[in-house]
């Protein structure tokens, strides 16, 4: 059993939790992920490591409530336990030798982009951060990003905060101005990463995208997380989760990510009904 | 009463009716009654050569246990089996007895005669024991040596059990959230009820074996750390062959295409077969399972139980199907359609072009080509050749690729000095010794995908070698 030792709502649908898991905390690195289960017979949920504290033995995760399982996770509080928390899985972000990097995060993906930006900042790299959200209410981790960024850009879809537009807007302006980066690292919704990668390809800037496909075991056993990268089949759990963004078949990844869209919305409904029953 | 039962045929195994069982996940075979077991046991003529014992990968003293069954001393029979096998209730159900003990049985040599139902008797004895035995397993005093076992499948559980019985402090590390390996994620409930696996694991725990789940060795801890930081005198790797193969044909990334591992893991480990499960699984209307092994049969029969019309698509003929006869017969009885000498060439998608349409990117059919058998190849099987221009389409909404698995590269990649063979199998000698001192390996991780009992045999041999290694250190 793994205890929840910290919990904070970052916005209405995004929560940060700190879990006591010393074996995971000992090895975790930016870019890696964990798999947890909320209850017995629950599904295995992969989540990228948002932060870790080796001394305290804790690992932080940030998740968005998207289905029944994440909803049930969000109902847990400090002091409660979850039955399973395994990791770190996948390969860590490759940051060695990078001196100037642009980190592009979108929505809850910013939670995963932050530790990468932080790790780069700590190794002395110049970090440009571009973060995007749908609107002001959904903004998370702004101060944390600013603290590790040499240059910071905020955009919202509706212009309610920062500049109006998507993350490609400031990125394009920077590239247009002649700004150069060793690498662009992008983490967020597939559609956003697709456009970021299309843009950086035009400018010939190497881009790494962090993928979060459907998976079960996270050790290479099920093949559910397969992606096409450079025309070859790759398993995100063992070969990734980060890949050369210019090689990823995003259209296929987007299609596969919706395999269980019906089931998930049904689950969400059921969970909501259960909550309603509890209120009576 | 005659000493022997000279009936040329086995007592038939009571089973659920095919038309009923293909709609539920309860166990197909129901097991012998005590009378049936004693009657069957009397078919063993206690021949001198005892070919069955030599043909058993763990050398169970088969005629001896059968003699006890014939006497009605079922607990006595169990104690004889338990000396050589840690998982009798499992083996009695999933061993390919027809190619092992029963394949060599003297009673089965003559045409029209069947071997003694050794597997059925083993199952009966194990189930009887699990139901009736009151004695609790005793913990053996520790010899204060520690052994780590990586993986809790049949190889790991056997190795752990044998070492615990010798007094070793054994810790089993399992990557998933429940112990049992392929017995839990792979083999379906209707062939091997999970309660039986749990019981076997609980027996090991009672022996003093510690089971640590959620421990992906290679990531959470390395083999080196187990030996140095955690003080294990030896490590046994039984991590299996879990990496699924695909065909590299167009369309394998469409929605509705599964590896057999994913489909079975969703259903078995994650309980997606239960209507109230939180794990989604596709309930296809028409499913093609590509492959002809036991895993393909398991996937096909699972899909059938979830309500689909199911086709086995296999490139060779009936004779060459690698699955056990019994599994093939069961599948046929349950209404699985066998499209033999048929090989997929591509998987087709719905003709929806708008990615936002929910129907976009789903499987809509599988294009196959007819095959004919040529000359025998190096494996001795006649190699199939495509009949040009014979392509045809099976309309399906789900495809399950069951083409075999290879060892997971995680340990190879994270253990410097661990030598592997061409297909990623960990290189071992005849007792399971790897290229690293104190590190042993057995089962599918060393051989590539094989059977439960072979993995158990390897776990057993390695346990003996580990004991010798530590005692001579």
Image: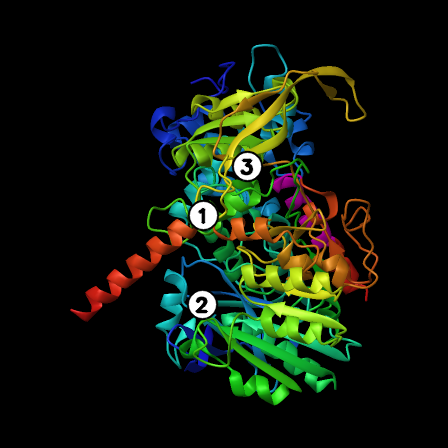
Q: Which residue is mark 2?
A: A83
Helix, strand or loop status at disc 3: strand
Who's the residue at 72% across and 59% down the image? B411
Q: Which is closer to the viewer, label 2 or label 1? A: 2
Is B463 magenta? The answer is yes
Q: Which residues are magenta?
A: B450-464
Q: Where residue B221 sits: x, y (%)?
A: 67, 69
Residue B194: mark: 1
Who's the residue at 71% across and 43% down the image? B448
**Residue sitting nearer the eye, B100 or A106:** A106
**Residue sitting nearer the eye, A83 or A273:** A273
Q: Which residue is mark 3?
A: B400
Image: B53 above or below B358:
above
Who's the residue at 49% across and 30% down the image? B396
Image: A46 above or below B458:
below
Q: Is residue B445 visible?
A: yes
Asked if labels 3 and 1 share a chain, the reply is yes
Image: A163 above or below B352:
below
Q: Residue furthest left?
A: A280
Q: Where residue B93 sits: x, y (%)?
A: 51, 36
Is B12 magenta? The answer is no
Asked if disc 3 and disc 2 are in contact, CB closer than 8 Å, the reply is: no
**Residue sitting nearer the eye, B364 or B370:** B364
User: Does residue A201 appear left or right of residue B137 in this picture?
Assistant: right
Q: CA distance from mark 3 to mark 2?
A: 31 Å
Image quarter of the C terminus of chain B: bottom right
């Amino acid at each position: 059993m793994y205890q929840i030792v910290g919990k904070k709502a970052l916005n209405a649908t995004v929560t940060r939790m700190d879990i006591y898991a010393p074996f995971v905390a000992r090895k975790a690195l930016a870019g890696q992920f964990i798999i947890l289960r909320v209850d017995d017979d629950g599904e295995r949920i992969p989540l990228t490591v948002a932060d870790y504290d080796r001394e305290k033995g804790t690992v932080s995760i940030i998740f968005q409530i998207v289905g029944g399982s994440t909803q049930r996770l969000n109902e847990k509080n400090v002091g409660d336990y979850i039955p399973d928390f395994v990791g770190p899985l996948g390969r860590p972000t490759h940051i060695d030798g990078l001196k100037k990097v642009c980190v592009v995060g979108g929505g809850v993906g910013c939670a995963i982009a932050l530790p990468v930006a932080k790790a780069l900042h700590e190794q002395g790299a110049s970090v440009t951060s571009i973060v995007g959200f749908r609107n002001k209410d959904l903004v998370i981790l702004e101060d944390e990003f600013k603290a590790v960024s040499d240059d910071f850009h905020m955009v919202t879809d509706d212009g309610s905060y920062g500049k109006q537009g998507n993350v490609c807007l400031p990125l394009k302006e920077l590239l247009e101005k002649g700004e150069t980066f060793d690498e662009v690292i992008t983490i967020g919704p597939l559609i956003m990463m697709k456009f970021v990668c299309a843009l950086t390809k035009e400018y010939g800037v190497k881009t790494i995208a962090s993928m979060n496909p459907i998976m079960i075991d996270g050790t290479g056993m099920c093949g559910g997380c397969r992606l096409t990268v450079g025309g070859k089949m790759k398993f995100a759990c063992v070969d990734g989760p980060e890949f050369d963004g210019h090689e990823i078949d995003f259209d296929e990844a987007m299609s596969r990510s919706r395999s269980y869209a019906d089931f998930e919305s049904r689950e969400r409904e059921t969970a909501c009904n259960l909550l309603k029953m509890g209120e009576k | 009463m005659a000493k022997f039962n000279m009936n040329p045929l086995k007592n038939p195994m009571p089973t659920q009716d095919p038309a009923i069982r293909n709609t539920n996940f309860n166990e197909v075979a129901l097991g012998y009654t005590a009378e049936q077991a004693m009657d069957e046991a009397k078919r063993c003529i206690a021949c001198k050569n005892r070919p069955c014992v030599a043909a058993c990968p763990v050398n169970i003293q088969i005629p001896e246990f059968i003699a006890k069954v014939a006497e009605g001393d079922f607990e006595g029979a169990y104690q004889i089996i338990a000396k050589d096998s840690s998982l009798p209730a499992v083996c009695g159900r999933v061993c390919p007895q027809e190619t092992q003990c029963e394949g060599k049985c003297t009673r089965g040599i003559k045409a029209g005669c069947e071997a003694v139902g050794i597997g059925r008797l083993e199952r009966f004895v194990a189930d009887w024991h699990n139901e009736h035995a009151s004695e609790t397993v005793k913990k053996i005093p520790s010899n204060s040596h520690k052994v780590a076992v990586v993986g809790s499948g049949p190889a790991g559980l056997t190795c752990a059990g044998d070492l615990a019985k010798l007094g070793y402090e054994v810790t089993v590390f399992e990557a998933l959230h429940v112990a049992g390996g392929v017995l839990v994620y792979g083999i379906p409930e209707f062939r091997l009820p999970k309660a039986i696996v749990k019981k076997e694991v609980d027996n090991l725990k009672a022996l003093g074996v510690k089971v640590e789940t959620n421990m992906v060795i290679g990531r959470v801890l390395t083999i080196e750390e187990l030996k140095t930081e955690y003080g294990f005198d030896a490590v046994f790797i039984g991590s299996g062959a879990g990496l699924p193969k695909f065909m590299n044909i167009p369309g394998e990334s469409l929605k509705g295409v599964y590896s057999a591992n994913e489909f079975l893991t969703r259903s078995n480990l994650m309980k997606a077969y239960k209507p109230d499960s939180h794990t989604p699984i596709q309930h296809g209307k028409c499913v093609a399972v590509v492959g002809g092994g036991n895993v393909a049969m398991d996937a096909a029969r699972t899909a059938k139980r979830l309500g689909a019309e199911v086709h086995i698509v296999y490139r060779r003929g009936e004779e060459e199907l690698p699955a056990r006869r019994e599994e093939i017969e069961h599948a046929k009885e349950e209404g699985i359609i066998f499209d033999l000498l048929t090989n997929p060439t591509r998987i087709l998608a719905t003709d929806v072009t708008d990615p936002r349409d929910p129907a976009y990117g789903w499987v809509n059919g599988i294009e196959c080509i007819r095959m004919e058998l040529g000359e025998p190849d190096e494996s001795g099987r006649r190699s199939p050749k495509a009949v040009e221009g014979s392509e045809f389409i099976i309309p399906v909404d789900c495809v399950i690729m069951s083409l075999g698995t290879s060892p997971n590269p995680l340990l190879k990649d994270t253990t410097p000095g661990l030598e592997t063979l061409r297909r990623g199998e960990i290189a071992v000698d005849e007792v399971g010794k790897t290229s690293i001192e104190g590190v042993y390996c057995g089962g599918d991780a060393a051989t590539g995908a094989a059977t439960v009992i072979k993995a158990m045999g390897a776990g057993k041999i390695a346990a003996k070698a580990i004991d010798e290694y530590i005692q001579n250190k």
